[in-house]
Image (cartoon, rainbow, N blue to C red):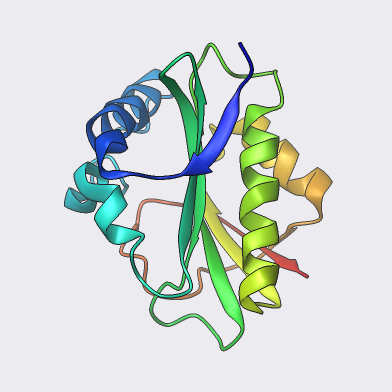
Amino acid sequence: MAITYRKIEERDDESLANLIRKIFREFKIDKPGTVYTDPTTDHLSAVFTAAQSVYWVAEEDGQLLGGCGIYPTAGLPDGCVELVKLYASAEARGKGVGKALMQKSIESAQHFGYNEIYLESFPELTAAISMYEKTGFKYLSAPLGNSGHFACNVWMLLVL
């Protein structure tokens, strides 16, 4: 069956939270100051009801494979949105799922009229960082905005 891409729904919350935390344990980045301990991780469908935000999920045969979205994080410069919570299950990696989710999020940012996309990550997530670089994200020397994820130590920006 084909992979389908759709906007997050409340029924996705538990599966997505479990997937995100599993990935954080896999890469040994399950620590305070990340989405691992962020209480909103359990209710992402509610988080993405905010204006000018969207979260995309990938699904195959009723199984969530991953997700990615954009969110107008407090403190970002005007016209800038944050690329958030890009995760793909181990089974989905290397199949273009993460790239497709990121591309849908970038297209959504353009649709909303943003001209920059910011992200925070970890050096352990080498495949994701490589994908960001290939997409045109450039490294920043310090974080932007007020995500509250103080443990992240890779910051990047894409000018649209």
- Residue 5 lies, in percent from the top left, at 57, 36
In the drawing, does residue 92 fall left or right of residue 130?
A: left
Furthest toward the bottom, the residue is 78
Instruction: Residue 79: name its quadrant.
Output: bottom right
Q: Is residue 13 above or below residue 18?
A: below
Q: Residue at x 17, y 50 (%)?
A: 39
Q: Count numbered badges in the picture.
A: 0
Q: Is residue 122 visible?
A: no
Q: Residue 55 at x, y = what percent?
A: 46, 51
Name of the residue lying farthest toward the left: 39
Q: Is residue 49 left or right of residue 2?
A: left
Q: Nearer the viewer, residue 86 or 123?
A: 86
Quadrant of image for the C terminus: bottom right
Snapshot quadrant of residue 23: top left
Position of the N terminus, as image quadrant, is: top right
In the rendered image, the vertical position of residue 123 relative to residue 147, given as above or below: above
In the image, residue 136 sits, relative to residue 2, either above or below, namely: below
Name the spot of residue 106 as percent of width and height, x first: 68, 58
Give me the residue at 42% from left, 18% from top: 63
Q: Can residue 100 be seen in the rendering of this structure?
A: yes
75 relative to 135 in the view: left or right: left
Q: Position of residue 128 (x, y in %)?
A: 63, 36
Residue in the image at 29% along x and 59% along y: 47
